[in-house]
Image (spheres, rainbow, N blue to C red):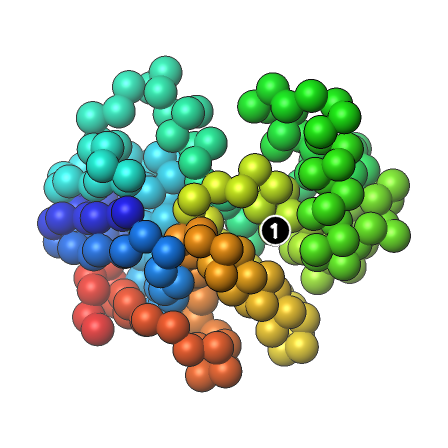
Amino acid sequence: MIQLYHVYKYYSNYQALIDVSLKVEKGEFIYITGPSGAGKTTLLSIIFCGVKADQGQILVNGKNILKIRDSDIPYHRREIGVVFQDFKLLPKKTVFENIAFAQRVIGVGSKEIKRRVWMTLKMVGLSHKKDILPLRLSGGEQQRVAIARALINEPPIILADEPTGNLDFDISMEIIKLFEGANAKGATVIVATHNREILKRNPHRVVKLNRGRVVE
């Protein structure tokens, strides 16, 4: 599903990724862990085509995304649900509208959007908040909206960058259970986290980064 071979990423003042090789099987759930600045966010961004690697080979669903044309990047991203640490919700749109946006982008009809959004809201436990603006929600609720938006198109790949970083333990466990539910339905899930309690309570394969290198 996802294969990285000898991947490097340089920024002006440091090396974010150094000779990273990694293989993630279809339907696998893995954690990317390591201290702040280890390269976790950069690794996910490269898979998503948020940034471009400087060297190496990256295959996602058999496509070498280092050779992908700019015009094809939006189609590549439609196969990936991304959950950002800072949520990236649209502040002037309701919970319902934020989730529906992902469906409108791919041209789904209004009736089907309404059905799918309602189903997804129930899945994340927010059907009673559908008409609320994001800034009136708690941090955990905003994160669940972001997850619902990532899941609604049923992407084969889900990437989550520190999705529990600012949440308390109980809510963090609920968030991980949502990702495990998507994984149980067949999605390949990669979660970047430094939360050791999550790794212990919800064990999956762990890839550890440190200073841009895979060390474990």
- Depth check: give the residue in front, 117 or 137: 117
Residue where numbered disc 1 is placed: 147
Query: Quadrant of residue 70 in the image?
Result: top left
The answer to whether residue 131 is above or below residue 112 is below
Q: Is residue 185 visible?
A: yes
Residue 88 appears at what percent x and percent y? 61, 42
Residue at image location 37% in from the left, 25% down from the top: 73
Report the front residue among 171 and 211. Answer: 171
> In the picture provided, is 135 more to the left or to the right than 155?
right
The percent coordinates of residue 136 (x first, y second) are 84, 50
Which is nearer the eye, 57 or 128?
Answer: 128
Asked which quadrant contains residue 21, the reply is: bottom left
Instruction: Point out residue 209 in the picture as x, y percentages from the top left corner.
Output: 27, 65
Name which residue lies at 48% across and 41% down.
155
* Count of all numbered marks drawn on residues in the image: 1
Element at label 1: helix
Left/right placement of residue 209 relative to residue 83 reads left
Q: Is residue 170 above or below residue 110?
A: below
Q: Residues within 10 Å of mark 1 (few under 14, many from 20)?
A: many
Question: Is residue 97 visible in the rendered structure shown here?
Answer: no
- In the rendered view, does 88 fall on the left or right side of 20? right
Residue at 71%, 30% in the rendered image: 113
